[in-house]
Structure formats: structure tokens, C-alpha cells
Image: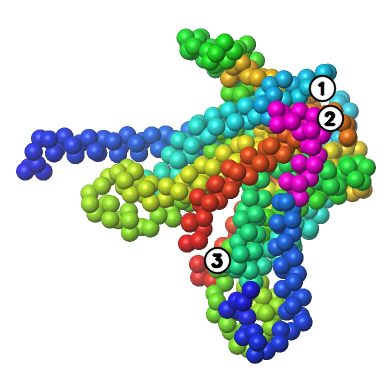
């Protein structure tokens, strides 16, 4: 440092200063972001836990003052999300297998891949409006089935994308080995490639379920919501997100409290599914050595 | 359609089971394309009555009057663009800061837990943000932020004689509150995608910069950002796409007044909020419903454009 001129030293100091200041601003940004998000979660849990009782899980929605719960909304959500995942996940898996194993870089596969990426981030409100026109209007009414179809259309591209990504991680040697043993193409995929990638595909499915469990906008146009017990999928059906919407905009404190509880239940469910998906991914990634 | 994984075609007949297998997979791929095309077609058909009635003028019509059955989309389009872009302007610098912090300056021990926390927060359903906006942020805005903004920025001249920036009755709902909620909502998403982009920069490039004596900030602005500029913009456009179509977080705090906005803090509306709010009253077969479907069609075309640009910019990254 002794030989440096004053000008060089000043420039060195200035560069260090810029680095420190910008680095500090980035730490501040991280702080602001984390504080904001912590604030939201804290509000969610403090308000949500306050309204959480056994009645929440055992009693259906009812009039203010008569102590209702969210049982019908929870069952409705489970049914619609379950059926939606049962339609969307296999379809998405097939799309993923097509992209990774059959279509690859062909022209049609490139189009499918591009369109799938668009659907992946398309506004869910539009999926709802679309399903309203194909599954509600022609059949004369809102239904749980329509809700499930909308959720399936949201789940499909997520599963397709993760399935393709994970299948590409399966070493080519697995396929070559299977072919060398005389396997047919469908056997290579069904008996070698898919089992090897099982944990990763499960990750995609869990993430998709987590995503559709919190979707509200599409259900507004399809299953609408229902205040009473109903497990008939051809009728309008309650769901946790729709119950939250209905209960938030009311002057009754116990309804607002139930809305917070519902929001907390969904968030906990979604976060648990996300964490579970991490474990299943870690399992498969560990098995393949990265 | 020949692929390396297939046993030499021509020397051996394709087994019927493989033919069925390939056909069904192609069909699944076709379903994806068919879904997108039918969304476009069905939304357009549903909104046709609105386009027939008002022509292309529907897009820039400023009046929205259910009584006289005159509908124009411009108030909702304006609200959508203003809230989404404002949200991006707030969320991007913070999200980028978090991403830089996570990839460069963050202590090794904190890196994984913070990264996981950000990704988990990106998964929190949007309705939770909506509720928080409605019960916490909106009252806070009306009580403290809006009076302060109004008195501090009263000197900013209005745009024309109709748009008064921060001057409005402090009721807490409006475009600014909606933009803030959207910003908080897309923040973890932008931070996570930007972090992935920064992580995809080859370590050799960074090492080269450090070897030349660059500081961390200089390595970022001089080497990393130029190397991944396309993908960084791609992440921004993905965030924009999310903000444009977001419904539940906005419905709670936008105020739902379908008119040309006269202030950032006056009740307003976005396409998604108009569709969600007016849908329960719109009877099938009426102009009321057709207008909502036409709005949906416009939103779809806009999001499609934004997402297509995002995917194009991010493509290089995905190929690697």
C-alpha cells in the first residue's frame, strides 16, 4: 500500500465503499422482505389459532351466532383437490414422459413444451372462466366436478414440467441397459425410467396438489361454494378458499375469525406438502448421486 | 420421430404395444396444445357478443355503465397495468437484493434455511395475502400512509385535469394498496427465480472477475449481470405475468370501482377483479356475462404475450 499514489488510494477506497453500501442495501432488502413476510405469517397464525376449536373440524358452516365450523368446506376441498389431482397428475405425467422420452427435440414436442410453460403460469382466473363455459353452462349448474376439472387443468402443467425435468436426470445408461436386454420402448419407460425417477415425480405431484389446494379464483366460477353438508360432486360444493372469501367480507367477528382459521389451515397444509416434496426429492436425488 | 433410445427401426417391426404407447403419449401432448387453443377460442366466442356490440372500441372505451348497458374495458385495463407495473417496481429491487444477498454475501450457514424460507413463502396461497391486505394493510394505509402521502406530495402537478397522484379520500383501498399487496406476494417469487438465475452463472466467470481485483458488486454489475441479462429479464416478466392475472389478493383491496382512476389511492379495478366481482350478477346469455368473458380474453392475450417473452428470454437457461 505504501507505493500507491493518493489518487489510486482514493479510487480503491471509493470502490470499497460502493461495494459495502450496495452489499448493505441488499442485506436491508433481505431484512425488509423477511420482516414483511414474517408479519403476514404471524398475523395469520395469531388470528387463525384464536378461532381454532374442535367445532372447526366437526361442524359445517352455519348462521352467525350458532357456532358453526368449517367441516363441510374441508371435506369439499379434499374431494375437489383429490379428484383434480387424480385427473391432472396422470395426464401431466404422460405429457412429461412424452417430452422427455418420445418427443424430445422434435418440432411438436417443442410446441407442447412451450404451451405447457405458458399454461404453467397462466392466470388461474381464466382457467375458471374457461371451465365455467365448458363444464358449468352446458350442464346447467355449478358442480364439484367442474371445480375438479379446473384444478386438474392447473395441476397438469406443473406435473408435466417436473416429470420432464426429473426424467432428464435419469442416466441414459439405464435406458441403454434395458434396451440391450431386449426391452420394448414402453417397458424401458414403465419398468426402468419411471421407477428410477419415482421420488422426483412424486415431488411434482405434491407441489401440484399444494398449488391447487390454495386456488380460489377458479372455484369461484366452477364449484361456487355451499353452506351445507354435501359430498355430491354434481352439486355446488363448499371449499376452504371459498369459505374464506364468504366469511371475510362480513361484519360478524366469529365468521371473520373462522376465515382466519381457514386461511391458516390451508397455509399449513400447503407448507407441509411443500416440505414433504423436498424430502421425496432429496431421496431420489441422493439415490442418483446428485 | 426417430429417437436414439428406439431399437433400430426398419430392422425390427415396432411391437403393437409400443405403437399404442407412443400414440397415447402423443395424445397427452396434444391435450396440452388443445387446452390452450380451446381457452383462446372459447373465451373469444363467449365474449363475441361484447366485441360485436362495441367493436374494437371496447378496448379503449372508458365508460362502464350496467344501467345503460355501455361497457368499456379501458378502466380495468389501466388498473391492471398500473397495479402490476407498480408492484414490479417495488418488488424487483428488493427481490434482486435478496437474491444477491443469498448468492454472494450471505453466511454459508444461513443460505439454505433462508433459501427454503423464501421458496415456502412463494407457495403461500394468494388469498392469504388478500386477507392480510384487507384486515391489516388497508386500515394501516388509511390511518397513516395515505394522509402523509397526500400532504407530502400535494405539489406534484396532476396528469391532465383528471389524475391527481396521491390526492384522494383516505379510505385505504385502491391501486396503491393493491400494488403493495401484489409486490409482497411476488417478492418471494422474484427473489427465488432471480437467485436461480444468478446461481446459473458459471463460477469461472466470477473467479475471473475476482482475480482481476473486482469487488463483489463490480463482479455482479460488470460480469454476472451481462452474462445472464436475458434470464434476469425473463424472471421479471414471469413476475409481471403473475401480477397481471392475480385475482384474490387484488379483489380484497382494490375497492372495485370501475371508472378511469383519478388517483393512485382511489378505489379502482383490474380485469381479474372485475371478472371475479361482477360474475355472480351476470346471467348466462346476457351482455353482462359476454363483457366479462371478453375482458378475460383480453387478459389472456396480454398474459400470453408477457409469458411468451418470459419463456423466450429464459430458454437459454433451460437448455443448459
In the displayed structure, does residue A237 sit left or right of residue B162? right
Q: What residue is drawn where x is 78% and y is 19%?
A: B65
Q: What residue is drawn where x is 79% and y is 58%?
A: A87
Helix, strand or loop status at disc 3: helix
* Magenta run includes residue A60: no
In the displayed structure, does residue A31 sit left or right of residue A231? left
Residue B287's disc is 2
* Magenta run includes residue B54: yes
Label 2 vs 1, first from the N-terminus: 1
Assess whether mark 2 and mark 3 are in contact (beta carbons under 8 angstroms). no
Assess whether mark 1 and mark 2 are in contact (beta carbons under 8 angstroms). yes
What residue does disc 1 label?
B69
Helix, strand or loop status at disc 2: helix
Q: Residues within 10 Å of mark 1 (few under 14, many from 20)?
A: few
- Judge if badges 3 and 2 mark residues of a common chain: no
What residue does disc 3 label?
A285
Amino acid at each position: 500500500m505504501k507505493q500507491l499514489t493518493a489518487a489510486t488510494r482514493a479510487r480503491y477506497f471509493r470502490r470499497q465503499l460502493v461495494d459495502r453500501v450496495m452489499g448493505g442495501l441488499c442485506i436491508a432488502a433481505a431484512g425488509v422482505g423477511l420482516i414483511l413476510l414474517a408479519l403476514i405469517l404471524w398475523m395469520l397464525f395469531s388470528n387463525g389459532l384464536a378461532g381454532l376449536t374442535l367445532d372447526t373440524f366437526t361442524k359445517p358452516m352455519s348462521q352467525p351466532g350458532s357456532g358453526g365450523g368449517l367441516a363441510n368446506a374441508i371435506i369439499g376441498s379434499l374431494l375437489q383437490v383429490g379428484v383434480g389431482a387424480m385427473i391432472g397428475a396422470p395426464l401431466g405425467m404422460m405429457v412429461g414422459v412424452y417430452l422427455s422420452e418420445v418427443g424430445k427435440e422434435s418440432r411438436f414436442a417443442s410446441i407442447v413444451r412451450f404451451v405447457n410453460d405458458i399454461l404453467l403460469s397462466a392466470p388461474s382466473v381464466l382457467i375458471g372462466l374457461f371451465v365455467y363455459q365448458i363444464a358449468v353452462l352446458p350442464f346447467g349448474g355449478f358442480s364439484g366436478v367442474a371445480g375438479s376439472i379446473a384444478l386438474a387443468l392447473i395441476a397438469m402443467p406443473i406435473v408435466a414440467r417436473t416429470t420432464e425435468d426429473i426424467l432428464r436426470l435419469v442416466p441414459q445408461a439405464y435406458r441403454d441397459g434395458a434396451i440391450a436386454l431386449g426391452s420394448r420402448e414402453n417397458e424401458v419407460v414403465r419398468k426402468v425410467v419411471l421407477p428410477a425417477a419415482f421420488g422426483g415425480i412424486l415431488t411434482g405431484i405434491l407441489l401440484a396438489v399444494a398449488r391447487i389446494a390454495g386456488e380460489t379464483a377458479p372455484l369461484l366460477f366452477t364449484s361456487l361454494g355451499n353452506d351445507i353438508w354435501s359430498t355430491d360432486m354434481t352439486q355446488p360444493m363448499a371449499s376452504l378458499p371459498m369459505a374464506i372469501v364468504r366469511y371475510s367480507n362480513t361484519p360478524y367477528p366469529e365468521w371473520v375469525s373462522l376465515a382466519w382459521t381457514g386461511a391458516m389451515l390451508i397455509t399449513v397444509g400447503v407448507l407441509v406438502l411443500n416440505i414433504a416434496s423436498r424430502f421425496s426429492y432429496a431421496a431420489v436425488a441422493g439415490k442418483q448421486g446428485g | 420421430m426417430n429417437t436414439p433410445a428406439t431399437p433400430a427401426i426398419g430392422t425390427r417391426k415396432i411391437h403393437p404395444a409400443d405403437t399404442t404407447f407412443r400414440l397415447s403419449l402423443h395424445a397427452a401432448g396434444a391435450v396440452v396444445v388443445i387446452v390452450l387453443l380451446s381457452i383462446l377460442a372459447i373465451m373469444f366466442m363467449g365474449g363475441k357478443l361484447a366485441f360485436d356490440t362495441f367493436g374494437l372500441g371496447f378496448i379503449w372505451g372508458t365508460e362502464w355503465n350496467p344501467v345503460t348497458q355501455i361497457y368499456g374495458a379501458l378502466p380495468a385495463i389501466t388498473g391492471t397495468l398500473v397495479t402490476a407495473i407498480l408492484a414490479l417496481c417495488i418488488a424487483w429491487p428488493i427481490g434482486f437484493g435478496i437474491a444477491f444477498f443469498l448468492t454472494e454475501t450471505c453466511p454459508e450457514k444461513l443460505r439454505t434455511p433462508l433459501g427454503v424460507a423464501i421458496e415456502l413463502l412463494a407457495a403461500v396461497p394468494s388469498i392469504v395475502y388478500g386477507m392480510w391486505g384487507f384486515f391489516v394493510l388497508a386500515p394501516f394505509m388509511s390511518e397513516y400512509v395515505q394522509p402523509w402521502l397526500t400532504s407530502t406530495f400535494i405539489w406534484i402537478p396532476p396528469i391532465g385535469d383528471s389524475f391527481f397522484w396521491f390526492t384522494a379520500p383516505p379510505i385505504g383501498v385502491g391501486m396503491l394498496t393493491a400494488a403493495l399487496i401484489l409486490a409482497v406476494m411476488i417478492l418471494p417469487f422474484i427473489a427465488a427465480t432471480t437467485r436461480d438465475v444468478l446461481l446459473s452463472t458459471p463460477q469461472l466467470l466470477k473467479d475471473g472477475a475476482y482475480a482481476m481485483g473486482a469487488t463483489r458488486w463490480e463482479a455482479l454489475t460488470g460480469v454476472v449481470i451481462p452474462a445472464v441479462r436475458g434470464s434476469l429479464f425473463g424472471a421479471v416478466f414471469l413476475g409481471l405475468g403473475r401480477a397481471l392475472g392475480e385475482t384474490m389478493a387484488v379483489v380484497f383491496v382494490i375497492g372495485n370501482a370501475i371508472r378511469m382512476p383519478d388517483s393512485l389511492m382511489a378505489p379502482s379495478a383490474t380485469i381479474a377483479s372485475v371478472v371475479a366481482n361482477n360474475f355472480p350478477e351476470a346471467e348466462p346469455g346476457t351482455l353482462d356475462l359476454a363483457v366479462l368473458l371478453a375482458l378475460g380474453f383480453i387478459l389472456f392475450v396480454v398474459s400470453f404475450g408477457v409469458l411468451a417473452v418470459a419463456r423466450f428470454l429464459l430458454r437459454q437457461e433451460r437448455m443448459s
